[in-house]
Image (spheres, grey):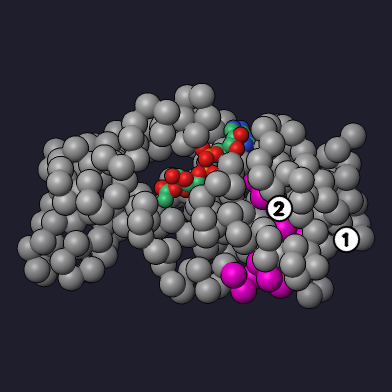
Amino acid sequence: METTDLEAFLSRAKALCVLTGSGISQESGIPTFRGNDGLWKQYRAEVLATPGAFARDPKLVWEWYAWRREIIHRAQPNAAHQALVELEAEFSARPGGRFALLTQNVDGLHERAGTGNLIRLHGDIWRLRCTGCGAERQDYSVPLDRLPPHCSFCFSLLRPAVVWFGESLPQEEWARAADVSASADLFLVIGTSALVQPAASLPLLAKQNGGLLIEINPAPTPLSGLADLAIRGKAAEVLGGLSSRIPDA
Ligand code: OAD
């Protein structure tokens, strides 16, 4: 059975790097982007998730993020988020062991589950950034006010501190992500369609540097053919209770 292979790979690894996408939060009740019920099937990214969209219609974009916040606010981390917390503890306790979690998700469920070494590639829906001076602050309000607030320093509009289409990833996070990917001996990709660059290139970086690649996803992706192990299943079903099943190396 495939999960036995997963446990065997994990028991032999030293430096584990994990990349997650919206699929890991699907079993928590948060919609993905490109599945049948995905957000980009119902809404157009170019009117909701670009800097131009916010400049044209800040209220519309703000309301869309307010709605997503409400869904996320009701959600709880699931067994897959929890399993990654346990894997971090397990790898940190191994001699020479390392763990890093790179996420494209902005929902904050990895943080709520308790992951420590987390790199957010696409920002954080619970953070606001000034469109003028760039000042940032956390903001957990649900529901949000109907209009975006103004910056208390320069009075420009505040926007969600997430990466929109056409924007670069945060530089420092990207550099750290590339670094841990290149030095991983095992790279686990969970719940991403692997269609959005540059995040989708990180597993390739691991492979190019000799790392093994495991994918967990109910559907095939462009990475599946490169994977040393492709597990067709839902994240929480595959990963739930995993750490107690990993044999000693
Ligand atoms: P996608 O919606 O593109 O892909 C979600 C993936 O999760 C698909 O491959 C599904 O098959 C898989 N999936 C669905 N349910 C799952 C489950 N229960 N367990 C495991 N996998 C499951 O979402 P992302 O790959 O995260 O970017 O999308 C990448 C980026 O595109 C997002 O970060 C966002 C979006 O536009 C920005 O907002 C910049």
7 relative to 79 in the view: left or right? right
Name which residue type carries label 1. Answer: Arg
Q: Is residue 85 above or below residue 96?
A: above
Residue holding disc 2? 188
- Dot 1: within a 10 Å radius of its alpha carbon, few (fewer than 14), some, or many (20 or more) residues? some
* Residue at image location 21% in from the left, 42% down from the top: 62
* Residue at image location 18% in from the left, 70% down from the top: 133
Tell me where the magenta segment starts and ends, as one range. Answer: 178-190
The residue closer to the viewer here, 39 or 68, is 39
The answer to which of marks 2 and 1 sits earlier in the sequence is 1
Name which residue type carries label 2. Answer: Leu
Viewer-side label of 2, 1: 2
Residue holding disc 1? 12
Q: Quadrant of the N terminus?
A: top right
Is the Cβ of the residue at disc 2 closer than 8 Å to that at disc 1? no
51 relative to 150 in the view: left or right? right
SS of the residue under disc 1: helix
SS of the residue under disc 2: strand
